[in-house]
Amino acid sequence: MSFLFSSRSSKTFKPKKNIPEGSHQYELLKHAEATLGSGNLRQAVMLPEGEDLNEWIAVNTVDFFNQINMLYGTITEFCTEASCPVMSAGPRYEYHWADGANIKKPIKCSAPKYIDYLMTWVQDQLDDETLFPSKIDEN
C-alpha cells in the first residue's frame, strides 16, 4: 500500500502532521476528544462558542483521517489483492477509481488498490496548504 509505505517519495506513511501541543488547533482537538466520549453526538460536533468554523472542520477532518487510517491498518491483512479483487459494496455496487487529475476515466481495481488511491488522494488534500493551512493566525 503506497499510503502506508509511500512510494511517492520513499518515506513511510504518517498521518497529517501532529498538531503542536499548546496551539489553538491542539486545544480544539482536545475539546473534540472530550465531547466525543460524552455520548451526545450533537454536542460532540457542535462548533465551540467563539471558534472559527473552517478551523473546527479542518481539525476534525484531519483527526477523522488519522482514525480511519489507523483502523484500516488493522485490517489490511484480511483484504488482499487476491481476496478482494474488486472494490464493492455487495454484488450490486462496484466502485471504480478516478481522481479527476491523474486518473480521469474511472478504472476498475482491487479493494486494496482503491483504498490506496483514496488514502493517498485524501492525504494530498490534507497536505495542500491552500485547502488545509497548518499555520492559522492566533488571536
Image: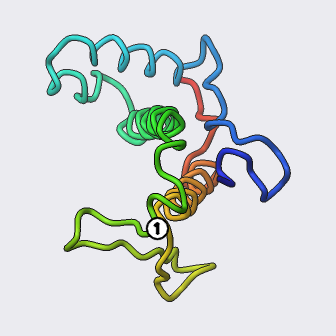
User: In the image as oriented, which residue stretches furthest toward the right?
Assistant: 10
Neighbour class for label 1 at 10 Å: few (<14), some, many (≥20)?
some
Determine whether, in the image, residue 23 is placed left or right of residue 55. right
In this view, the residue in front, 94 or 16, is 94
For image coordinates 69% across by 54% down, the residue present is 2
Query: Based on the displayed image, in which of its 4 quarters is residue 137 positioned?
Result: top right
Task: Please name the amino acid that badge 1 sits on.
Answer: Pro
Residue linked to disc 1: 85
Q: Is residue 55 visible in this depiction of the protein?
A: no
For image coordinates 77% across by 41% down, the residue present is 12
- State the image coordinates of residue 72 (x, y, percent, origin top left): 48, 40
For image coordinates 25% across by 29% down, the residue present is 45
- State the image coordinates of residue 127 (x, y, percent, origin top left): 64, 49
Mark 1 falls on what kind of element? Answer: loop
Image position of 95 with respect to 25: above or below: below
- State the image coordinates of residue 57 (x, y, percent, origin top left): 38, 39
User: In the image as oriented, which residue stretches furthest toward the front?
Assistant: 82
In this view, the residue in front, 110 or 16, is 110
Query: Based on the displayed image, in which of its 4 quarters is residue 131 positioned?
Result: bottom right
Image position of 119 with respect to 92: above or below: above
For image coordinates 70% across by 42% down, the residue present is 13
Total labels: the figure holds: 1
